[in-house]
Amino acid sequence: MAWYVYVLLINVIGFSVMGIDKQRAKKGQYRISERTLFLFALIGGSIGVFTGMNLFRHKTKKRSFSLGLPMIIIAQIISVTFIILSTSA
């Protein structure tokens, strides 16, 4: 149960961080680093970061994001599938 709460929370945070960075970009303020954005994706918030990227139209032209985030999502899906299949056998 705690795992689901973590995944939900980290995705909400990842989504929010993309929105915050977009607003800061519009205002010319201090930005959240791309490294931090990718970190949120890597620690389980990839769906939230990807959704935020597309909804806020933020970082969509950057190849590292337009290609990198889908690759992270695919890798996470494969990893979770492998874990589920190996523990249920």
Image (spheres, helix red, strand yellow):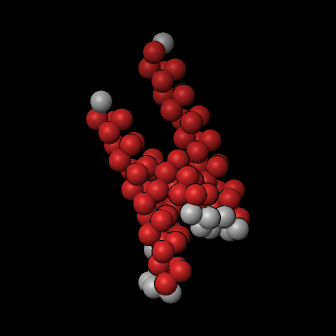
Identify the residue at the far left of this view: 2
Image x and y of residue 66, in percent: 68, 59
Q: Quadrant of residue 87?
A: top left
Q: Is residue 36 left or right of residue 61?
A: left
Q: Count of labels shown?
A: 0
Image x and y of residue 83, in percent: 48, 28
Measured as percent of width and height from the top left, residue 24 is found at: 47, 78
Tell me the quadrant of the picture where the N terminus can be found. top left
25 shown above or below 57: below
User: From the viewer's perspective, is residue 56 above or below residue 3?
Assistant: below
Q: Residue at x 46, y 56 (%)?
A: 15
Expressed as whole percent of the image width and height from the top left, the position of residue 7 reads 39, 42
* Residue 22 or residue 42, whichever sits in front: 22
Between 84 and 19, the one nearer to me in the picture: 19
Residue 41 appears in the figure: no
Q: Is residue 24 above or below residue 15?
A: below
- Residue visible at 59% across and 34% down in the picture: 78
Residue at position x 50%, y 32% from top? 80
Q: Is residue 14 left or right of residue 73?
A: left
User: At 64% from the left edge and 49% from the top edge, which residue is drawn?
Assistant: 70
**Is residue 26 visible in the rendered structure shown here?**
yes
Q: Residue furthest bottom?
A: 28
The quarter holding residue 74 reads top right
In-front residue for pair 49/85: 49
